[in-house]
Image: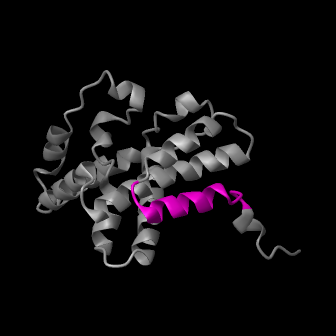
Amino acid sequence: MKKIADFLFEGKILKELPRAGYHFLGSGKENVAEHSFMTALIAFTISRIEPGIDKEKIISMALLHDLGEARTGDLNYVQKKYVDVKEKKVISDLTSDLTFGEDIAKLINEFNKCETREAKLANDADQISFILELKKLQDTGAKSPEKWIDIVIKRLKTDTGKKIAQSIISTDWDSWWLNNYSE
């Protein structure tokens, strides 16, 4: 059980790690755990509307995809040009002492290769999480998201991901709050 406790404490550190890209946006903030939660929630949603996929796999990939950042930190695209992250070693070291470590490693590797339908959908969930943040920032007056939304939308790989993104872009971030409003 000590290995389980260590694993959970390591995962918990994601709550303390800020996502690096927001520094370049000039507004907004999010930690890696918040991002992973949203990505998993989006993957759960996708798993319910996309027929014939392994629901547990897409949700698990979304939940675990940034787990290695507990050891490396979150690197934005500029930093990745200069830093060589040994992700296979990170994942191997992170999972080697766990009885279910091979399951985690397989899910993260599949997510990173982005070849299976589930991996493509989980990767889209990852990007949609960012699109949600950008849209909220845009709706609340930030200017820099305008530059990024189209770039992030172009990263989407599936029709389902593209449809969700378009719906997000055409919806005010707080419209759910005002639905059926009355005092």
| Residue occupying the point 58% across, 58% down | 166
Residue 48 screen position, x and y as percent: 43, 77
Quadrant of the frame with the C terminus: bottom right
In the drawing, does residue 19 fall left or right of residue 134? Answer: left
Compare residues 44 and 30 and report the one nearer the observer.
Answer: 44
Magenta segment: does it hold 158?
Answer: yes
In the drawing, does residue 174 fall left or right of residue 19? Answer: right
| Residue occupying the point 62% across, 39% down | 145
Quadrant of the frame with the N terminus: bottom left
Residue 46 screen position, x and y as percent: 43, 69
Compare residues 24 and 9 and report the one nearer the observer.
Answer: 24
- Start and end of the magenta stretch? 157-174
Vertical relation: 32 (above or below) 98: above
Residue 15 screen position, x and y as percent: 43, 47
Residue 96 seen in this snapshot: yes
Compare residues 45 and 155 and report the one nearer the observer.
Answer: 155
Magenta segment: does it hold 94?
Answer: no
In the drawing, does residue 52 fall left or right of residue 89? Answer: right
